[in-house]
Amino acid sequence: MDLGLQDSVVLVTGASRGLGAAMAIALAKEGAHVVATARSKDSLADVAAQGDGRITTIEADMRDEDSVQAIVPEVIARHGRIDALINNAGIAPAGKFATQDPSIWKDALAVNVVAPMLLAQAAGVHMIEQGAGRIVNVASTTGVRGKPFLVPYSTSKGAVVRFTEALAAEWAPKNVQINCIAPGAFVTEAQKAVTESPELHAKRIAKIPAGRMADPSELVPLACLLVSPLSSFTTGAIFVVDGGESGKL
């Protein structure tokens, strides 16, 4: 199936590894011009090398509002437009809520909530002027059902879910679709402590009805569809991709 992504311009944040890298590379293979952002110059270069010349990079720290606000203008300066945005960058500080420093909360909210909102606002203005556009916010199953010892993360991802629903309703008349993907347990570098420990891995998959963690490639088709013109009547949706974990009684 042709997704209609040839020569479209897609911005992907948190694209230096894991789900972000997988989405950026897949979109480039679909013919899109991808702008990948993250803090790590070297890791971004590795991702760009797999994009057949269709991935360019921007180093940016999602905690720095000035850095975030410079991204969309740079994308437009390079390509003249922006057709889709994937807000994937995120941090997941773990720990006991009673003893967490307030700075942990500030960083989680800055990266997981404020940065996606700033990017959506900047990109959305241009999408509305173009007459069409798509935004995909990557939340988490913790944004659907909060988890202990991940209180700042759960709170911030819950905000992403509500942000998606509210903005989707506001911008539907503008032909800008906003949707959300809420991944569960995926085999990424961020889950290394779990995947490299037989004991922790066994405990983790015991909670998943599908009986395993997912590969990043299993999220890619959905992401590609949601940033494509084929999703033109899909907006305000929250797609949980977790092997049935959230629905387990």
Image (spheres, rainbow, N blue to C red):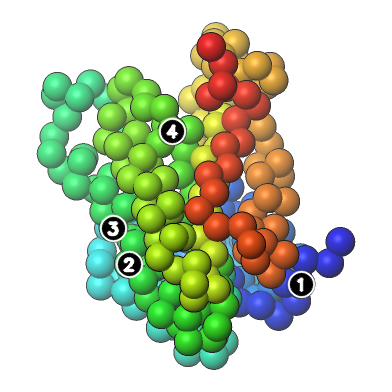
What kind of element bears circle 2?
helix
Residue 114 — which label? Answer: 3
Point out the tag, 1 or 4, that comes first from the N-terminus. 1
Task: Report the amino acid beneath label 1.
Answer: Gly
* Residue at disc 1, secondary structure: loop
CA–CA distance in space, label 3 to label 4: 19 Å
Q: List the residue tagged with mark 2.
A: 118
Q: Tell me the tag on residue 43.
A: none
- What is the distance, in whole Å, between disc 1 and disc 4 at their CAs? 31 Å
**Image spot of residue 95 (x, y percent):** 27, 25
Q: Residue at x 32, y 74 (%)?
A: 69
Q: CA distance from mark 2 to mark 4?
A: 22 Å
User: Considering the numbered disc 3 on the image, is that residue within a helix, a strand or a loop?
Assistant: helix
Query: Which residue carries the number 1 mark?
Result: 4
Mark 4 crowdedness (10 Å alpha carbons): few <14, some 14-19, many ≥20: many
Q: Which residue is mark 4?
A: 144
